[in-house]
Image: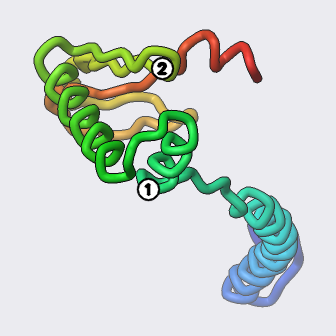
Amino acid sequence: LKASCGTTVISRWSCFASRRIRTMALSKKSMKSMKAAMKSMKAMKSKKSKAMKSIGRGAIAEAVIGDSGLKRSQIMKILNALGEVGSKEVKSAGKFVLPGICMIKTKQKPATKAGKRMMFGKEVKVKAKPAKTVVKAFAVKAIKSQF
């Protein structure tokens, strides 16, 4: 009896069984390659995990004390006031510049409609999203040119 899978077999069930075995063999091969890929990804993640730490407000205050001669409590008040003024300006005007450091801007992102979109060659259903305001910070040219 000639079966559809191309081998001579006694019953159709054995043909399906051989297909099942073939697919299992393929999945074992793909599992080996997937394990190798996961191993390399793990190695890359371990390299990236060592992130640089930024200094806190207290450390900034200590650094400014040496240069200005002001007391630590005065500098902490100035930093707090600067944060409050900056947040108010960004909220009202949409832009705030810390001279010599950065510029903080707001950007309006429009709402998106629900529907179907092509992503990586597949059609995907996308939910509708409301409009939102995004806050971004841009480094000043003097800092960019140092790197």
Looking at the image, which is closer to me, 32 or 21?
32
Which of disc 1 and disc 2 is earlier in sequence? Answer: 1
Determine the image quadrant of residue 90.
top left
- Nearest the camera: 71 or 3? 71
Residue marked by disc 1 = 58
Residue name at image x 19 percent, y 27 percent = 85
Pinpoint residue 131: horizontal percent, then vertical percent.
16, 25
What amino acid is found at the position of numbered circle 1 in the picture?
Answer: Gly
Nearer to the camera, 7 or 89: 89
Where is 95 relative to 48, above or below?
Answer: above
**The N terminus, quarter of image:** bottom right
Secondary element under disc 2, as helix, strand or loop, is strand
Residue 120: x, y in percent? 56, 35
Question: Which mark identifies residue 32?
Answer: none
| Horizontal arrangement in the rendering, residue 77 relative to residue 69 (left or right) | left
Would residue 113 appear left or right of 122 to someone viewing this image? left
Name above or below for residue 5 compared with residue 24.
Answer: above
Identify the amino acid type marked 2. Phe
> Are the residues tagged 2 and 1 within 8 Å (C-beta)?
no
> Tag 1, which secondary structure?
helix
- The residue that label 2 is drawn on is 138
Q: Position of residue 32 (x, y in %)?
A: 86, 75
**Residue 1 seen in the current view:** no
Image quadrant where one finds the C terminus: top right
Which circle, 2 or 1, is nearer the viewer?
1
Query: Exactly how many numbered labels are in the figure?
Result: 2
